[in-house]
């Protein structure tokens, strides 16, 4: 089911048939570098990740959507407006994970802007926020190009930290009011 469409992307709901797409995406060490540092095990995708994605759809209209490149029909990753556990849409976390082959082509920004627009115009969202490792410059650029602004740097404790963790995590955000002033 189509959720959003941009000039170059079709964002649709995930289905049980997307296990292979998620395994493929999360098996690339480049994709997972700033997340877990290692591929997500297939069993975790089958038993936790995909059921979690599908469960979010039952709680409300926000969630994670498969990103399909229109020109090729290929799965290239996902874009999300992740709801809190209660499924509310007042504050949503923007997320994106794209295959390395799709990097540097503006897809993350294009998908993020469409998701943000949906949140503010259709879902009643008041604030969209995102976070990443401070050293993840490409992701920070996507946040900025999508209209989010830097809020803070903070430090979390990890038992097995990834390289760069010592520099902290960063949060970016965009309010509905700020978006409306500069809406694309």
Image (cartoon, rainbow, N blue to C red):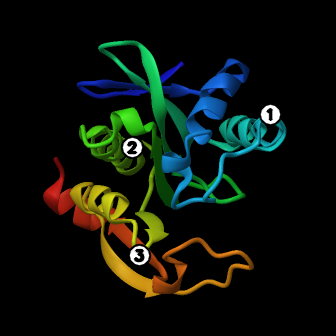
Q: Relative to 41, is 16 above or below?
A: above
- SS for callout 2: helix
**Could you say which is closer to the camera, residue 30 or residue 50?**
30
Residue 3 pos. (x, y %): 46, 27
Point 30% across, 55% down: residue: 142
Q: Residue furthest top?
A: 72
Residue 83 pos. (x, y %): 60, 54
- SS for callout 1: helix
Give the class, few, some or many, for how many residues have Cα within 10 Å of label 2's Cα (few <14, many ≥20): many
**Could you say which is closer to the camera, residue 85 or residue 80?**
80
If the image is split into quadrants, where does the N terminus sit? top right
Point 48% across, 52% down: residue: 95
Which of discs 3 and 2 lies nearer the camera? The answer is: 3
Q: Earlier in the sequence, mark 1 or mark 2?
A: 1
Q: Relative to 32, is 28 above or below?
A: above
Give the class, few, some or many, for how many residues have Cα within 10 Å of label 1's Cα (few <14, many ≥20): some
Count of number-bearing discs: 3
Point 36% across, 59% down: residue: 139
One can see residue 141 in this view? yes
Res. 55 image quadrant:
top right
Label 3 belongs to which residue? Answer: 134
Point 24% across, 66% down: residue: 178
Q: Are marks 1 and 2 in contact (CB under 8 Å)?
A: no
Kindly report the distance in space between the C-alpha atoms of the residues bearing marks 1 and 2: 25 Å
Q: Earlier in the sequence, mark 3 or mark 2?
A: 2
Label 2 belongs to which residue? Answer: 115
């Amino acid at each position: 089911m189509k959720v959003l469409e941009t000039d170059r992307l079709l964002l649709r709901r995930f289905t049980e048939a997307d296990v292979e797409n998620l395994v493929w995406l999360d098996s690339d060490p480049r994709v997972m570098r700033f997340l877990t540092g290692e591929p997500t095990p297939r069993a975790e995708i089958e038993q936790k990740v995909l059921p979690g994605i599908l469960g979010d759809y039952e709680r409300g209209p926000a969630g994670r959507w498969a990103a399909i490149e229109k020109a090729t029909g290929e799965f290239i990753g996902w874009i999300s407006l992740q709801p809190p556990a209660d499924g509310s849409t007042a504050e949503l976390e923007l997320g994106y994970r794209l295959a390395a082959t799709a990097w540097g082509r503006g897809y993350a920004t294009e998908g993020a802007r469409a998701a943000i627009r949906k949140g503010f115009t259709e879902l009643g969202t008041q604030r969209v926020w995102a976070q990443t490792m401070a050293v993840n410059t490409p992701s920070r650029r996507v946040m900025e190009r999508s209209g989010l602004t830097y809020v803070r740097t903070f430090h979390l404790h990890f038992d097995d930290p990834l390289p760069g963790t010592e520099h902290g995590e960063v949060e970016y955000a965009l309010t509905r009011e700020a978006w409306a002033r500069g809406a694309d």
